[in-house]
Amino acid sequence: MSLPDQIEALATGFALIALSAALLITVWRIIRGPTLPDRVLGLDMLVAIAIGLIAVVAIRTGFNLYIDIAIALGLVGFLATVAFARFILARGLSPETANVERSSPESKRASAPRSNAVRRKHKGGRR
Amino acid sequence: MNPVLDMAVAVLVAALLIVGAIFSLLAAIGILRFPDLYTRMHAASKAGTVGSGLLLLAAGVHSLDAAILIRALAGFFFFVLTAPISAHLLAKAAHQAGYKLTKLSVVDQLPQK
């Protein structure tokens, strides 16, 4: 094994370890994430890390077709995040989050989002 | 192949790989440690995009093929274009739905409709 190959093997090994750690940390945030937008953001980050992982695998195996797969995954991830954002906008606050915020001490600020969600329900607009 | 060029490409690819992996790891740590959604977005949409973009660029340089390098660059620009859009949409939707900022934040200039 020549010296350039050794350097690349070392770098790809380090990148794989770091990206695996990042993947695990992001999954932990998705599991714990207190609200739905936190989880959506975690999924967005998961897609970004998976793209990086695919690029590292492309270097390690030498199959350049993996780059096209990474681009396609990025497109799907962008569309998924946009769709989730529309869903959050249409749904408003989730019931469990509203309960948590009502029991918090500063009730004056917490009442505004709740009335917003109620008004949205009355209007009966786009779901 | 020229051994000097071979070595230069290997060093460049290794540097891009290590920097990109560190960016991705720091973005993930930021997602874990920041207090609320709006601050977590800083880590995810800036550091995360740069991390995966640098890794894609490393794959393009490693191939030593102009067509594949251009494809990797196109993917990089696509991510740089779409990450702010999706982050902005998500932040605006969450703010409009009523998800609150953390108590550490000083001012919220976007009025609650």
Image (cartoon, coloured by chain):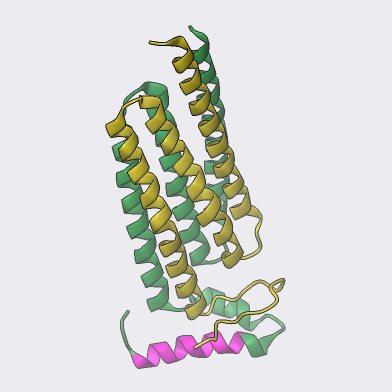
Q: In this view, does A31 lie above or below A66?
A: below
Q: Colour of chain B?
A: yellow
Stretch of the chain drawn in magenta: A110-123
Residue B66 position within the rendered picture, expressed as x and y whole percent measured from the top left:
30, 31
Going 59% across and 54% down the picture, which residue do you hit?
B31
Q: Is residue A10 above or below residue A52?
A: above
Residue A58 position within the rendered picture, expressed as x and y whole percent measured from the top left:
38, 29
Query: As rendered, which of B51 and B93 lies closer to the eye?
Result: B51
Q: Chain A is drawn in which colour?
A: green
- Can the viewer see residue A53 in this picture? no
Going 48% across and 13% down the picture, which residue do you hit?
B4
Q: In this view, does A75 lie above or below B13?
A: below
Overall secondary structure of the magenta section: helix
Q: Does the magenta stretch include residue A113?
A: yes
Going 66% across and 81% down the picture, which residue do you hit?
A103
Quarter of the rendering containing residue B71: top left
